[in-house]
Amino acid sequence: MSEVVVKDSNGTVLQDGDSVTLTKDLKLKGSSTVIKRGTLVKNIKLTGDAQEIDCRVNKMDIVLRAEFLKKA
């Protein structure tokens, strides 16, 4: 089984434990919460999907799309 390569919006390869910043404001589904552009997300975890990462933002565990992130 080959390892999944996850790339940010600039094409930089992401790894577990990296820090990333958001490139646009994101509204969370099912909530009125908006995560603002420029928010720093530390210690990301890769999933099995090439476009999704697990992370913790504002004490919430969420999944973000890699296309809205850039490596910090």
Image (cartoon, helix red, strand yellow):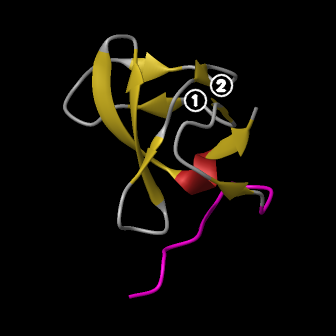
Q: Position of residue 30 (x, y in %)?
A: 19, 32
Identity of the amino acid at label 2? Arg
Q: Nearer the viewer, residue 17 or 9?
A: 17
Does 58 sit left or right of 25 as displayed? left
Identity of the residue drawn at 73% across and 40% down: 71
Which three-letter amino acid code belongs to the residue tagged 1?
A: Asp
Q: Residue 37 shows which numbered tag?
A: 2
Discs 1, 2 touching: Cβ within 8 Å: yes
47 or 1: which is nearer to us? 1
Give the numbered dot on residue 25.
1
**What is the quadrant of residue 63 in the picture?**
top left
The residue that appears at 23% across and 24% down in the rendered structure is 31
- Is residue 36 depicted above or below 5 in this figure? above
Query: Which range of residues does the magenta coloring cover?
Result: 1-11
Residue at the image point whose x is 36% and y is 57% from the top: 47
| Residue 53 counted in the magenta span | no
30 to the left or right of 22: left
